[in-house]
Amino acid sequence: MMTPRGYAGKFLDIDLTNEKITNTTFPEKDLEQYFGGRGLAAKILWDRIGEKWREVDPLGPDNLFIALGGPMTGIYPGGRICISGKSPVSNGTVGSTASTEFAHELRTAGYDGVIVSGRAEKPVYIMVTEEGGEIKDASHLWGTMGEETIKLLNKEVTRVLDSKKEIGLWKEPGMIYVGPAGENMVRNACVMTKLCHAAGYGGYGSLMGSKNLKAIVAKGRGALPEVYAPEAVKLLWKRAHEHLIANDSFRRQGTGYGGWSTATSYSSEPVRNWQDEWHDERSFGGPMFETRFWVKKKWSDFNCTTNCMKVACVKSGKWKGAITDNPDYELQAYCGANFGVFDPAENIHLSALIDNLGHSGIGGANTMGFAAELYQRGILTEEDLGFKLEWGDAEAFDKIARLIAYREGIGDVLAEGTYRAALKLTEMKGVDCMPYAIHVKGIEIGAHGTRSDADFLAHDIGYAVNVQGGDHTSIVRDGYHELSGAVFADSAVYCSFARTPQELIFDYAKAITGYPLTIESWRRENGPRIVTLQKAFLLLGGPDVIWEPIKDDDNPERFYAPLPTGPFKGRTTDRKLVERRRLAYFETLGWDDRGIPTKETLNRLDLGYLEKSMTGLR
Amino acid sequence: MVKPIWISRDYDACSGCRRCELACSIHHEGWMWPEASRVRVFMPFPGLEVPHLCSQCQDYPCIESCKFDALSIDPDTDAVIVDREACTSCGLCITACPGTVPTLHPGDNKANICDLCGGEPKCVEVCVEAGYNALTIVHEEPNIHRKLYSRNPVDTARDLAVKMFGEKGLEVIE
């Protein structure tokens, strides 16, 4: 069989329980229909778990940890990896992507992805080269913080490679790994890469931890996969970079100018666990980060000239030694304003710590803000925590981050993620904690509020009906436009910040694969197929939580309370509009009025295999 | 007469986009092939990106070391030219290079060394186009400093780490 164009052609299947490694391929029909990344991962999950979905514990050996590239990975600017599996937070699936050199190293080693099943008896890491996969002991890596993991693996893996083959100098491998938070199965922990890059949504760090899997490293020496029309791709590659290079303000500021401006201009930034979304803390402005802390102003990932990342380092004072990116807007917001912290050095320290621990800078920090609000309200006390958790106290947030990562004391409850912690604390304290849990379907919400309706991403149903819950990178607009946007990008697997016109992207995809795909076909067939499959997983959910149609297809209650301050004071999310647009969204996707895909839709999208499971829910 | 060119390197300015690797391999191999590139960007720790390529030492120890006359100097550009027929993949040039710059090509296993693209290096084109200027062309006569750029990229990154991260920089690379 000829290798489909744009694909390395094979996937590594690794059963950690039986230490069995095989090469797998998928039918070309699956590749054409689901493409890669988010879409293909969902198909693999259905094929291998399927109707047993509800019974499978996301943190048990029957779940799969999946890391996939897509046909555009490495070839189109902004190389990413897409992580998936049954999500320990939503009990559905998320296509959770992170920019990393791991992705093109994997593809040049001859693999489009790695599928990990079972559970290793002791900590291991997986090494992928052109020779295949190897399971290696990771006892010495277990417990290490991100910085240390990178340092040790870079040294160790290059030494191993050099002993296998002398080629001159071996370059360091690409890697994805978990920090202590992932190891200790903090439910919303990230899969980390490159120190401060993360596949954040979905809680797949805890899934790696549950498998005793510390890291996957890859080093390839081959070319990127062959494509259908190489001359066209080379031309489009140049054009795409021209677009990226012309994006001047984004290249200069990254998202690291957003920590002040999003709040002050749009009133859509989490402030003290979303009690507010506006602030005017100019100490937190972009230039205050840039002038004092940015030691590299243009930092890129593989094949990307957007360079939205900036390396930040604190070189003096109490937080000396903290290294991270900008921080990007999400972490400025969540590890800054959300903690009532408006000092750039403190924000850089907390972001770096949270990355090093392998927490999600959004999800984990959301849980920490949730805890701080419970402290503010006297629900959690100094006795519970062992210290005072006051807004703006960076030291206290440093402590809570560690407490959760190591599941110490009350940290063990908070390590279940915001939603599950709220359930437990409600029971423990006899006070309803749910109003302070800012999540949709267990997934803590990105740093973009809906109340002002002025945010550049999030509006009314953006999260409420999103099959990836609070994931701000996969926000719903209308069940049409986003399908050729985020759903496509996560399946073709490239970074959505590698911004070029959509027509160019689809020409690129066509030139790579030769498939007759169009923007329209993604909006009407491929996109709906992937999202409908994800919706089915979410409806099935379980085993600990099953989401209720309509009731759980909604924003957190706080998003309907009026904004307390700022230029948008008094404004809030329009509940009637949410109801109307939710129904319209369901109709567009061909789901019934409770959001359950109809038989007709399943047949139209070639998803007949879901019918048996969906009948029971209708 | 036009002075020979040299690729000047400014490590601080390297974004790590690795488009140099792609442009180089597209030019020499016809397709994107990072490890076949004559320039490779090392990243011993995130944020510390070091483009690693031939620095055309004045005394060309690689050429000196070759027992098979596979390496020569391009009369126009001063670049090291590899005769792939004559190369036996023995690796002596790699050992002789103070920076261990050459690699054995992942395709034909022959010594892989920057040939300056005949005087118009593609890596420089894309780097300058993106405004990074981590790699730029200078027109100058050979000088003794060049050889000092021929250095293990991990050692270069160690220095860069201290410059960028201060004392913390001493800890990030083992």
Image: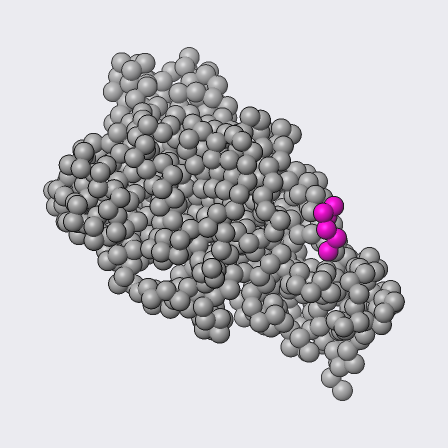
Kindly tell me whether residue A177 is visible in this rendering.
no
> In this rendering, would A98 be left or right of A557?
right
> In this rendering, would B38 be left or right of A359?
right
**Residue B22: image location, x then y, percent:** 57, 65
Q: Nearer the viewer, residue A166 or A450?
A: A166
**Residue A553: image location, x then y, percent:** 21, 38
Residue at (42% x, 64% y) in the render: A513
Residue at (29% x, 15% y) in the render: A427
> In this rendering, would A147 be left or right of B115?
left
Kindly tell me whether residue A480 is visible in this rendering.
yes
Residue range highlighted in magenta: A162-167
Quarter of the rendering containing residue B82: bottom right
For residue B119: magenta? no
**Residue A399: image location, x then y, percent:** 49, 25
Residue at (26% x, 25% y) in the render: A434
**Residue A229: image location, x then y, percent:** 45, 71
Q: Could you tell me which quadrant the C terminus of chain A lies in?
A: top left
Residue at (60% x, 73% y) in the render: B27
In the rendered image, the residue lying farthest to the front is: A1
> In this rendering, would A131 be left or right of B53?
left
For residue A165: magenta? yes
Q: How many marks?
A: 0
